[in-house]
Amino acid sequence: MITYRATLDVADELALYLSRLLVAERRRRGTRRGRRVLTPFQQAVLGLRWFRHRTPIPVLARDHRISRATGYRYIDEVITVLAAQAPDLHQALMDAARRGVPHVILDGTLITCDRLGEKTVSKKGRQVHRWFSGKHQRHGGTVLLLTDHTGFPLWSSPVEPGRVHDLTAAEHHVLGALYWAASQLRLPTLADGGFQGAGIGVHTPVKHSKSAPRRSPLHPDNRTYNTLLTSLRAQGERGIALLTQRWRTLQHITTSPRKITAILQAALTLTHHEHNQPH
C-alpha cells in the first residue's frame, strides 16, 4: 500500500465555520463530549473533502478510520447544517436591491444523477422515467438558480424531477417572488427563451410570432433587444459554473436525487461564506 500526503484547497476559516455549525448541532441533539469518533473539525474536513473533490464516502470513511455507515451519517449531518444557513428567496431579493443590483438573472440547470427506475404518467398517458430529462438526455434533477448581475449565485430552488420544464419549476418556486421584486423593489429579472411567457418583470428574448413566416427576420429593434439581453444574461452561466466547478459533488449525484435540494443549498452556503456574502 502506498501512502501520500494531500492538501485540501479551502481556507482554514471555512473549516472552522463549518465546525462551529457542527458543534451547535451536537449541542442541539444533546450529544455528550467525547461520544463521537471524530471531532467537529475533523467532521468538517471530511465534509469539505466530499463537496470539493467528490471523494467517495467509503474512501473518506477509510481515511478517517470510521465505518462506512458512520461516514454516510456524518456527511448527511454536514449537508443538513449547511443547508439550514442557505438564504431565503425574499431575503436574497431584498439584499440584492439594497446593494443596488440593477437586475437579477434566472437560469435553470440539470444536476445529473445515477439512473433511476421511478416512473410517472405523461400527459399522453404513457409511462415515462420521472427523473429523465428529454432536453439533456440524462437522468437528473431540474433546479433554478438566481444570480446577481455579475453572475454570483443568490438563491437556489428546490429540486424538481428532470422531466419538469424550467418554466413549470419557476411557476412552482420563484415567479411570485420575482413579480413582487419587480413591482416593489424595482428589480427586474432576465431569463432565456425557456422562460417565455413567465410574466411581467421577467424579460426574455423576443421570438417570431406563430403567424409570421419562419424565415422572416426579426425587426431590427427586436434583434437589438435580444443582443443586449443575451449579453447581460450570459453572466448567469457564471453562477452555475461557480457552484459546480468549485464544489464538484454537484457535477453528478450518486445518492437520491431528492437530496439535491439540500446539497445545492449547502454548496450555496459554502460559496457565500467564501466570498463574505451575507446568508
Image (cartoon, grey):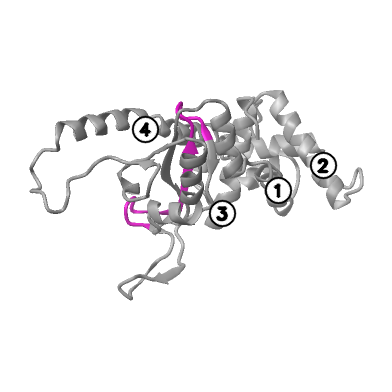
Answer with mark 2 or mark 1, whichever residue precedes in sequence.
2
Question: x%, y% of residue 239?
Answer: 47, 33
How much space separates mark 3 and mark 1, taking CA atoms?
Answer: 14 Å
Highlighted magenta segment, given as a residue range:
133-153
Answer with mark 3 or mark 1, whichever residue precedes in sequence.
1
Identify residue for label 1.
Answer: 71
Q: Is residue 264 above or below residue 100?
A: below
Answer with mark 3 or mark 4, whichever residue precedes in sequence.
4
Identify residue for label 3.
Answer: 255
Q: Residue furthest front?
A: 184
Secondary structure beneath disc 2?
A: helix
Three-letter amino acid code of the residue under disc 1: Gly
Residue in view at x 45 percent, y 33 percent: 241
Q: Residue 183 or 66: which is nearer the viewer?
A: 183
**Do the residues bearing badges 3 and 2 touch, measured as CB atoms within 8 Å?**
no
Q: Residue furthest bottom?
A: 125
**Do the residues bearing badges 2 and 4 touch, measured as CB atoms within 8 Å?**
no
Answer with mark 2 or mark 4, whichever residue precedes in sequence.
2
How much space separates mark 3 and mark 2, taking CA atoms?
Answer: 26 Å
How much space separates mark 2 and mark 1, taking CA atoms?
Answer: 19 Å
Residue in view at x 46 percent, y 62 percent: 116
Mark 3 or mark 2, which is nearer to you? 2
Asked if residue 38 can be seen in this view, the reply is no
10 Å neighbourhood of mark 4: few (<14), some, or many (≥20)? Answer: many
Identify residue for label 2.
Answer: 24
Q: Is residue 232 above or below residue 140?
A: above
